Image (cartoon, rainbow, N blue to C red):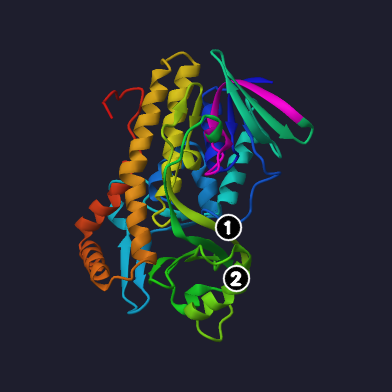
Amino acid sequence: MTGDVTVVGGGPIGLVTALGLAEAGVGVTVLEAASSVVRAPRTMLFHWSIMDELDRLGLLEASTAVGLPQRSWSFKVARTGEELMFDLSVLDDVVAHPYTLHLGQDELSEIILTRLAAMSNVRVEWDTSARALQQDADGCTVSAVGPDGERDYRSSWVIGADGAHSIIRRQLGLSFPGLTWPQRFVATNLGLDLSTLGYAPSTAIIDPHHGALVARFGEPGPWRYTYAESLTLPDDGIADRMPEVFRASLPDDVHPQVMAWAAFRMHQRVADRFRVGRAMLLGDSAHVTNPSSGYGVAGGFFDSVSLVEALAAVVHRDAGDEVLDRYSAVRRQVFTEVSSPVSTEQKQLIFDADDPLRLEADLQRYREITSDRTLMRQYLLAGRQLRSESLLTSHQPV
């Protein structure tokens, strides 16, 4: 089977990349190992910086109709109750959509799939696991196993969007250096309305033992409560330990009403490069960061923006393939200089605040930022650094 591009991985980043390419007139086949959209609790906070891109792709109206736009978020110190509020209204005069969006990644995937279903130049192959990648001067062959057995997918280009354990990255022989944090995240969906206990709709609870990311993604719920626990604790005991976690965080007579949960390790890793020949990586296949800042998903979206523009130009012979090397260098630099440092800083503040002197210094910095709208504006606008300039017009050295 032949086409312009094969996208391996049908999560939101893979699907939005397929949509962008298809709208640019590129033929796309998406291979996804799962049999349908994955419903387990994962990403649910989409940074304000990607709202313009969702709007450009015609996804924003449907997304905000299903999700919950938020105009503020806060740090809350568990020990003292101090709360530091970040107000996105300071961006009203410079940003078209100054809000974050609380939306399950499965819900966004369904919205994108609805758009893709109406397009003749893209198709999604479910329950199809990529096993090997070969490439030559003319194109790539992805060998996969699907409902009908083994099958080869031939295309001019391949994009690996298959997550942190990417088979495409491994087939390209790329290492994935970095670190794995000594904790795992446990993301839970709760039926309990946490607003009745004084929780704001988007709050990071700062505590060295009971730090958490708390967010509402419906009216009045459900709520997402994500906490960390030591990796030394056994995987098979997560559910058994969960009641103890909530007893330490909620009043004794309150039941959290856990509806669903998922656990995953936290990493800071980045591939050596994001292009090898006719294959490219983006999103978690190329780089992973802990989710404390929301920069990880936003970074993946902007990988997609850059790669769609560059690869569509190459396919249509409007640019040489050296633009794909620029994609690799520029997007890797954004991760190493922006996404990873900011995410690391916020993870350590929220979950590792065990040094009183360092904590007080960090809190004082954020007190100054949140008490001055000019400083707050400057701080929030740093999110624009997640997006790179057009690779077709910018030839600045990296």
Kind of element beneath mark 2: loop
Task: Give neighbour class at mark 2: few <14, some 14-19, many 20+ (Cα, 10 Å).
Answer: some
The residue at which mark 1 appears reads as 41
Mark pair 2, 1: CA separation: 13 Å
- Residue 381 at x, y percent in the picture: 28, 49
- The residue drawn where x is 41% and y is 57% is 292
Query: N-terminal of the two: label 2 or label 1?
Result: 1
Magenta segment = 150-169
**Residue 162 is covered by the magenta coloring:** yes
The residue where tag 2 is placed is 191
Q: Quadrant for residue 149, please give it.
A: top right
Give yes or no for residue 6 being in the magenta stretch.
Answer: no
Q: Secondary structure at mark 1?
A: loop
**Left or right, residue 56 beside residue 120:** left
At label 1, the amino acid type is Pro
Q: Is residue 15 above or below residue 260?
A: above
> Looking at this rendering, what residue extends furthest in the bottom direction?
253
Instruction: State whether residue 352 appears in this view.
Output: yes
Q: Position of residue 32 (x, y in %)?
A: 65, 38
For residue 234, the mark is none
